[in-house]
Image (tube, coloured by chain):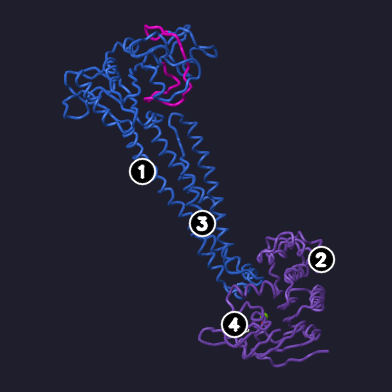
Chain colours: A blue, B purple
Amino acid sequence: MLLIATSIGVMAVILLTAVGEGARDYITGEFRSLGTNLLIVIPGRNETSGGGGPIDLAGLSPRPLTIEDAQSLSQIDDIRRIAPVVMGEAPAEYDGLERSAPIIGTTPEFLSIRQWEMESGSFLPGVSMRYSPPVCAIGKEIKEELFGDDSALGEWMRLGDRRCRVAGVIAEEGRAVGIDVQKIVIIPVALGTALFNRDSLFRIIVDVENSSRMDQTRQSILSIIKRRHQDKEDITVIKQDTVLQSFDNIFNVLTMALGSIASISLFVAGILIMNVMLVAVSQRQAEIGLLKAIGAKNKQINNLFVVEAIMLSGSGAIMGLIFGHTITYILKISFPTFNFLPPMWASYVSLFVALISGVMFGLLPARRAARLDPVEALSGNK
Amino acid sequence: MIRLEKLSREFQVGNQVVHALDEVDLEIKENEYISIMGVSGSGKSTLLNILGLLDTPTSGDYILSGINTSKMDDDEMAGIRSTKIGFIFQSFHLIPRLTAFENVEMPMILSGINPTERKMKASSALEKVGLTDRSDHKPEQLSGGQRQRAAIARSIVMEPDVLLADEPTGNLDTTSGKEVVKLIEELNLSGLTLIMVTHDREMGDRSNRLIELRDGKIINDQSNN
Ligand SMILES: Nc1ncnc2c1ncn2[C@@H]1O[C@H](COP(=O)(O)OP(=O)(O)OP(=O)(O)O)[C@@H](O)[C@H]1O
Ligand SMILES: [Mg+2]
């Protein structure tokens, strides 16, 4: 009963924080694993001052953001890498098997910006903003689906009305821009704009050499593109870590709130512990009297009961940890798209709170035991 | 070794004061064998509790081995109880969850004696009371006499100077009662000071000195020889 109360408390902390963390992870997932020095250039203007429309995530703003725009940014000294990105979807076909695949058109810089590893082969060899040999890199799942256990390297596959040779398989298993990397096909950026018959990039990702130069670089990008776009400021440049930060903050607060609500239940469990301990003290009066008669000091009696309270709450907490983690694990398997992540701190904090409440609520009964009059305790009345 | 001077113990019951002990003067020497007798409510248990530092007098002095105990704090008294005094109770007071052996170990655990020495002393104490083959039994698996013998083993394991027994045979049948008394008397012969509360005149007569209480006063103090 008591153990269950404590373990439910701990379990609640873990489950609720897991949901909170999972939600955060889901939202910020696409930014995760990116370096912090990134600027993201998006076509369209999301401030009313410029007079442009809202950000169009499809990249169909009145004035396109072109590969030439991306190339023009290389004149900024503070920029280390530039990765233009087009996105779309097209049927991928090999040897009669066909799958609809999410496609990203970009340059080799994309690999290092996202910090992906290759499982085999290489990422877009010989590709730059200018040159687009027909090569591609594919995710693990699409490789598996089209090629099975055979090697995909060097094979030609068809993408819509184009063909490309598979140059590498990506080891990554996470998500990028909301897409499962394992299903993805990556092609040269120019091939992408041609394939989707689109003149605008989805975005340009810029890796800045020195994080202290972020703001200056942002200004340089704005002015260079403005010059190229007939003096219209029709792009938006965001610092990816500010986006990440604000999401992170919101979800941290949320998770903490959920966690503290759950912690309250731990204190309820603490009060139950106190009751059980008080009953134990009165039931074991004679024993306490005896211990005193054979020379136990008050402090020893006190410690005995405190330790017992800690053990009670501790074993309840450990049960709760086991249940909580088992349930999140089951949820994880049942809902693989939503990543339930019980944060480490939740386990520590809930264990800590459970033990603290054990100590706090164990102290009073323990003190009562220690103060018992040995003669009365031995005679067992009261 | 024990001296009581004008020692009184009063209890407040409602608005009435009960004089459980009333200005008792008493001197007890080392290795004496004393029986305390008297009608119910005469103060025998109260006296024994005070001698065992489980209870403190309302007034008067209790001097143990030359030290006035009225100035001691709880921890000092616990220390004396641990090392100098052994208790035997009418109802044994063994801890039911522990085996006989573990019960005997208990005083040594409390005073922090290391496990090796503890095991050795516990087995030799159990051997002295003839319970070696019952070491691993829980109290409920022992007969009354065996329980009391386990309790005696526990009381002597710290090698105390004084053994205090409050009606040790009160819950036992005649045969096992006799065995227990014999055991306690042997301990007295080997050097322990023995103070025993009893209702049994025959047992009182076996002791070297018989003290009789009534209404908290000593009304008779005689030596038997
Ligand atoms: N805690 C207490 N509160 C009030 N009165 C008490 C308390 N303990 C003992 N007394 C009173 O003190 C007197 C002596 O009690 P005590 O227990 O010493 O008697 P006793 O000689 O041991 O009796 P018995 O043979 O029945 O065990 C009795 O009148 C008893 O009612
Ligand atoms: Mg009595």
Q: Which chain is indicated by disc 2? A: B
Instruction: Write the residue at 46% across / 44% down.
Output: A346
Q: Which residues are magenta?
A: A158-185
Describe the element under mark 4 as helix, strand or loop: helix
Q: Residues within 10 Å of mark 1 (few under 14, many from 20)?
A: few
Q: Chain of mark 4?
A: B
Instruction: Name the element at disc 1.
Output: helix
- Type of residue at label 4? Ser
The residue where tag 1 is placed is A253
Residue corresponding to mark 4: B70
Q: What's the distance in space between the residues labelled 4 and 2, CA to CA?
A: 37 Å
Label placed on residue A358: 3
Viewer-nearest residue: A111 or A343: A111
Q: Residues under labels 1 and 2: Cα distance?
A: 67 Å
**Residue B202 at x, y = what percent?**
80, 84
Is A126 on the left-hand or right-hand side of B188?
left
- Drawn side of residue A328 relative to residue A110, left or right: right
- In the rendered image, the vertical position of residue B72 relative to residue A300, given as above or below: below
